[in-house]
Amino acid sequence: MMLNSPARIKENVRSRKWDWHGYLFILPVLAVLAFLDFYPLAFGIYYSLTDFSLAHIFNYKYIGARNYLFILNGNIPPLAVLVWQTFEWSLGSIILMSSFGFLLALLMNQPGLRGTRFYRTIYLFPWAYPAFITVLIWKGLLDYNLGFINKFLGIFGIAKIYWFGLPSTSMLSLILVNLWLSFPYYTFVYTASLQSVPRELYDSARMDGYGTFGSVRKVALPLLKRQIAFVTIFGFIFTWNNFYVPFLLTNGSPGTSTFILITYTYYEATNSLPNWAMASAYAMISVLIMLAVVAVVNRFTKMMSVIY
Amino acid sequence: MTDNIEATGNQDTLETIIESGNTHYRRMRVVKRLITHVFLILIAIYAIFPIYYVVINSLSAGISLASVSVSSLLPLPTKLSFQNYTGLFRFQHGALLNIWLPNTLFYAGSATILGLALALSAGLALSRFRIPGKKVILYMMLILSTFPFVIMIIPMYDMFSSLSLTNSYAGLIIPYSAGAVIFSVWLIKNYVDGIPLDFEESAQIDGYSRTQALFRILLPMTKPVLIMAMLLSFFGPYTDYAFINIMVTNGSLWNMAMGLYAYSQVSSQTINYGQFSAFAVVMGLPIFLIFLIFQKYLVSGFSISTYK
């Protein structure tokens, strides 16, 4: 083996020059993304401007923005309602999950608390079991007539609750099931960040006379502000696009009261009279609104700066 | 960061030392601890219950959603039987063991291998080479990862049917392997960023070429993040329903999620709930155990992915 001179290596590993040969390594991924993301995305945008549906499956044509105008003006359910429900679902979930996770992490982060490792393992369970299955289990648990939860509440004389039967309660039930699915993730992430705060800082806050929650507010929150914002915003994006929970539990029912944009898109594309052009338009609208929200929030929290 | 998770614990803090002499404070502390434990145990029950519920139901012969009750959930050990499992394995001439399970493992396994190879080469290159347009590529991937799959699904179906890829193994495995690729690239890139250049440098002094140093020296050091990326790429296809439901009409290509969903759609009155539960256990338990075994890697991976 020939020994490389240290000078040449300096040029190699710590080189500041552009290295075109690195493209060989990322080319496969870029090809896959082009084939499976960019090409379909471009066609998705095109389809949203056509009348591609079951009625025009072989002879669809470009019709301009007519689908979007129809969505904005006349389609049932109205776009404003769908957008409201999507916000209700994603904001409601993320606020609940993020604060529940943070509080639980605080509880477990008390100095000298015994059994934290045991609790932590148990709290992994909802995260570890595939969500596709546990959502179906919750669907059975929350059944109005036969579900175990209503039977259990009945023992204490509590009347049966229409978990998924009423427009007014079903979105809340979805959010509660989502809380069960997601709180472990937030608990774990927040535990890690709370432990990155040096214990001495808490102790000195104690010396200054702050109580448990006072020291958290004065010490942990200011230090972790950006991390919390980052985790919450990515959680928001994830929940906005979370398909399986609303799809498996209610798929929009009762009426259209639990449709969010993404499940409604899927419904438009897969019901017995599919309208793929409309589905594409709804998908575009969903992405645009979500990206706009993230851009606005990023202006205030600068959370993207965590990445770079 | 994760090392800290492991190390939480029983260090005596200032608080303990100051207050240990005072009986009033000590009593207050005991009460506080007690309340904390009550909360933590209640949350633990909440976390475990649905999984306990489905395991017990799967072991109770002749159970239906209607007959689930407090006493059926606390059965005598002698009353448990594997009848539901034998029934499930006979269901539709053994479709689960002969078709759905092998298919699922084949899809998820090959997608994991392909996706990991793609993500590994791209992740290493994006961390170690100065590639022109690197930031653009990374941001592009980040934005792409916020797009829901439904946006791609309609054009993809069109594209795949013109390539005769619908109802084929390739038509499922190719998109599956791309499913987690963006996230894996990000994970690997961030992890490798944290490894000092010195290792490769000294390998190069020993005569390795740059690429050799990358794959012989650096690659073995990325084991934790590789395990994480591997598990993530496996979990997605394992429980996919939304995509396969559109791409596949041929029953011999079904995966377990399709089978379980079909099972759950039989109206809740007539469904054989014991067999459904057995299905949920057979499909979910392996993933659950893998997750618990590799929890160290998974949890650390998620904290890397959320912030550095």
Image (tube, coloured by chain):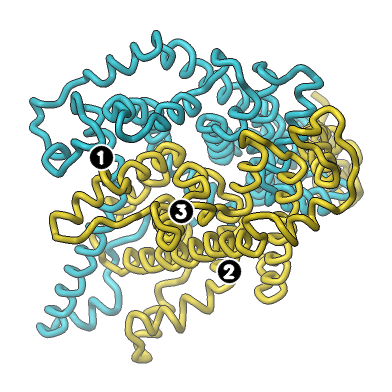
Chain colours: A yellow, B cyan
Residue A76 point in image, percent of width and height: 64, 55
In the image, taking residue B161 as reference, residue B186 lies left or right, namely left
Quadrant (top left, top right, bottom left, bottom right) of the C terminus of chain A: bottom right
Give the mark nearer the N terminus: 2 vs 3.
3
Residue on which the image places disc 3 = A185
Label 1 is placed on what type of residue?
A: Tyr
Label 2 is placed on what type of residue?
A: Ala
Residue B94 point in image, percent of width and height: 39, 11
Instruction: Residue at 41%, 76% (x, y): give it.
Output: A200
Task: Using the rendered image of the protein, determine whether residue B109 is visible from the camera's viewpoint.
Answer: yes
| Disc 1 chain ID | B
Instruction: Residue at 32%, 48% (x, y): give it.
Output: A142
Residues under labels 1 and 2: Cα distance?
34 Å
Residue B70 point in image, percent of width and height: 14, 44
In the image, taking residue B223 as reference, residue A14 lies left or right, namely right
Instruction: Residue at 81%, 21% (x, y): give it.
Output: B162
Q: Are marks 1 and 2 on the same chain?
A: no
Residues under labels 3 and 1: Cα distance?
20 Å
| As drawn, B223 above or below B195 | above
**Numbered badge on residue A229:** 2
| Disc 3 chain ID | A
Q: Are marks 2 and 3 on the same chain?
A: yes
| Disc 2 chain ID | A
Query: Tag 1's secondary structure?
Result: helix
**Dot 2, how many residues are within 10 Å of its Cα: few (below 14), some (14-19), or many (20+)?**
some
